[in-house]
Image (cartoon, rainbow, N blue to C red):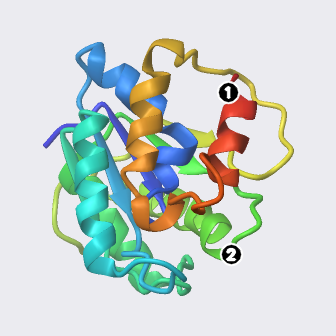
Amino acid sequence: MNLDLLAIAAHPDDVELTCGGTLLKMAQRGYKTGILDLTAGEMGTRGTPEIRAKEAAHAARLLAVAWRGTLGVPDSDVQPSRQHTLRLAAVIRQLRPKTVILPYWEARHPDHYHASALGYEGCFLAGLKQLPIEGEAHRPFKILYSISYADVRPTFVVDITAQYERRRKAILAFGSQFRPRKSRTKSSVHLAIDRLEG
């Protein structure tokens, strides 16, 4: 498969929160997009891996991605170990993305900042012809970083005004994670997203 744009993140719902609107916009323009969740989110306080997998599939349909998969790294064990990096490099060779979006390397959650390093190293190793893993060598042309919690000045911003509502629905597809309390009409996450994105 040859993807134009692949977003890689630690947990199901991370891509939807950080760059889901960009993926949708690119899919609407005819680009082939994909999401790779490094873990199934099994250490999360809410939901189960099975529930989160169903939510992720629903969100993927809303974002019109051509491919979504899980690398199978244990949740809370995301790190650029040789084993994880080689597995990721094999997926990069299989999907052959032109551009990869990774989480920004400064983050509150260790899985998120380790996902950045793991993603970068996996993309690099995938391009080494002599690396003894499955698939033909391939290195993405460009790596971009999505902002999550870090106070970072972006080098560019993608206007997702036209995609905002559908992207919001993709986030809300993760009902196990973002269900508002009965006393509120919106959760604090929804309110923060609305404030951030107008």
* 64, above or below 43, in the image: above
User: Label 1: which residue?
Assistant: 197
Quadrant of the rendered structure where residue 165 is?
top left
- At label 2, counting other C-alpha atoms closer than 10 Å, the crowd grade (few under 14, some 14-19, many 20 or more) is some
Mark closer to the chain start, 2 or 1: 2
Q: What residue type is labelled 1?
A: Glu
Q: Do the numbered discs 2 and 1 sit on residues whose CB atoms are within 8 Å?
A: no
Instruction: Give left or right: position of 117 versus 139.
Output: right
* Of 144 and 26, the residue lying toward us: 26
Res. 102 visible in picture = yes
Secondary structure found at label 1: helix
* Picture quarter with the N terminus: top left
Residue placed under numbered mark 2 in the picture: 110
Q: Where is residue 153 in the image (x, y as percent from the top left)?
A: 84, 32
> Comparing marks 2 and 1, which lies closer to the viewer?
1
Q: In which quarter of the image is residue 157?
A: top right
The answer, for residue 141, to whether it is visible in the render is no
Up-down: is 78 above or below 8?
A: below
Q: Can you say whether 56 is above or below 145 in the image?
A: below
User: Which element type, helix, strand or loop, lies under badge 2?
Assistant: helix
Q: Which mark is residue 54?
A: none
Q: Which residue lies furthest to the front in this view?
A: 183
Q: How far apart are marks 2 and 1 (CA)?
A: 25 Å
Q: Is residue 187 left or right of residue 124?
A: right
Residue 56 in percent (x, y) is at 30, 57
Residue 63 image position (x, y, % from top left): 31, 35
Q: Position of residue 41 (x, y in %)?
A: 43, 76
